[in-house]
Amino acid sequence: MNKLHTYYDNLKVSRTAPLEVIRAAYKILAQKYHPDRNSNNPEAARIMKLINEAYEVLSNPIKRAEHDSWIEAQEEKIRKIQDRNSNKIKNEQNSVDSRSTLTGNKKEILKGFSWLFFITLMGIFVLFLLPEVFSKFSSENEHNYTQNYSSVDITEIDSEASESLIMTYQTSFDCTKAKSIPENLICYNANLAALDRELAEIFHKAREAAVNKKDFTQLVRNQWNDREKNCIDKACLEVWFANQKTILTRVAETGHVNVSSLGKKISPKPLPNTGIMGETNLYGVAPLQIKTPYDGMNYFVKIDNAYTNKNLATYFIQSGDDLNVELPLGSYVIKYAYGPKWYGIELLFGDKTEYAKVDKILAFDFDGYQYSGYTIELVKQENGNLQTTSISKNQF
């Protein structure tokens, strides 16, 4: 059967291709043949027009159904013509077989040759003239199609791209709703899809750890917009994923979302003096002493109200120092972060920061004679009378 060239051929997809495959094929071809990227190719604009026409029809369920009906009708016409011609040739061949038998009679011999001469002429007609008639018939029936359904044989799609149209891979987003070139490239490439899933896990950790949620949202939006605007091939996306992994991993580890300094190397800052952090009008009466070992670890301590979780005060304690302060009466929870190097109030001790809390609620009160408080030694000891538990940054 003569092969019809349809919109499916223009997009290099099968007639049963789902919409997501059609969309991906269009994106890949549009990326390859867009006139802006083919200024030296005069055919690019024509090919791009054909690609757009094909996508307009195949992405519309109603237009696609009409196109499918047209294809079936044309194939049926071609099939009938070929069957009719095949039967005609077969019948004529049978006629030759039944009437060309030669006998010893001269008259019958001449008769046989006359039929043979006739059949020979018919054969010449079938072989040389009928295709021209058929071609004219086909062209007349396909007049409307060639006007509206122009075709082009696009053969320069990369083999990797062609294979990628077969299926989509699991990603962090819905590939059936993918609209941009980067999203479609991710959906139809196994390596990019794996990088997308990995980055999604890091993203969730970074979002939870981010100190400033608004800045984090803006950071992610800026990075995503940059990808959508500039990445139109696999290589660009691989670089983008690598950069995002570095940025979001640092946010997940430190909670720092300062967009201007994320790409820069952070440096340690001078240690604050042991004592309260920031200005405060705190007035206390009950004593609190915190002792630290001289082991190279410095401490950032938070005192929170045990029932409202409101922060009362924060203190810095250099390694080996003792903190001696007085707190207002009340019940408190003590949490602390520690590490060797100080990077500031947002980063604390950087990626080396550890977090912990005192398990017991500490009550600072007055019994009518004296104020009662606590002395805490942040030293791990066997049979110690005060238990501590490691916590996450979010719990801190």
Image: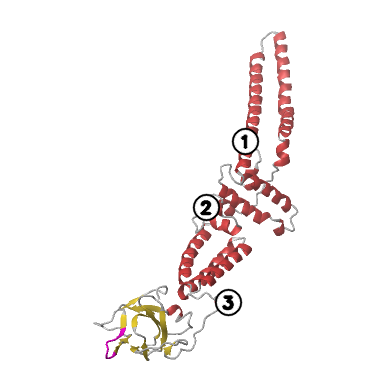
Residue 368 included in the magenta stretch of the image: yes
Disc 2 designates what residue?
A: 168
- SS for tag 1? helix
Q: Residue at x 50, y 63 (%)?
A: 195
| Camera-side mark, 2 or 3 | 3
* Label 1 to label 3: alpha-carbon separation: 58 Å
| Camera-side mark, 1 or 3 | 3
User: Depth check: 66 or 5 in front?
Assistant: 66
Sequence-earlier tag: 1 or 3: 1
Disc 3 designates what residue?
A: 260
Amino acid carrying label 2: it is Thr
Q: Hey, which quadrant is residue 138 in on the image? A: top right
* Label 1 to label 2: alpha-carbon separation: 28 Å
Sequence-earlier tag: 1 or 2: 1
Residue 149 included in the magenta stretch of the image: no
Q: Badges 1 and 2: C-beta atoms under 8 Å apart?
A: no
Label placed on residue 69: 1
Amino acid carrying label 1: it is Ser
Amino acid carrying label 3: it is Ser
Q: Position of residue 251 (x, y in %)?
A: 49, 73
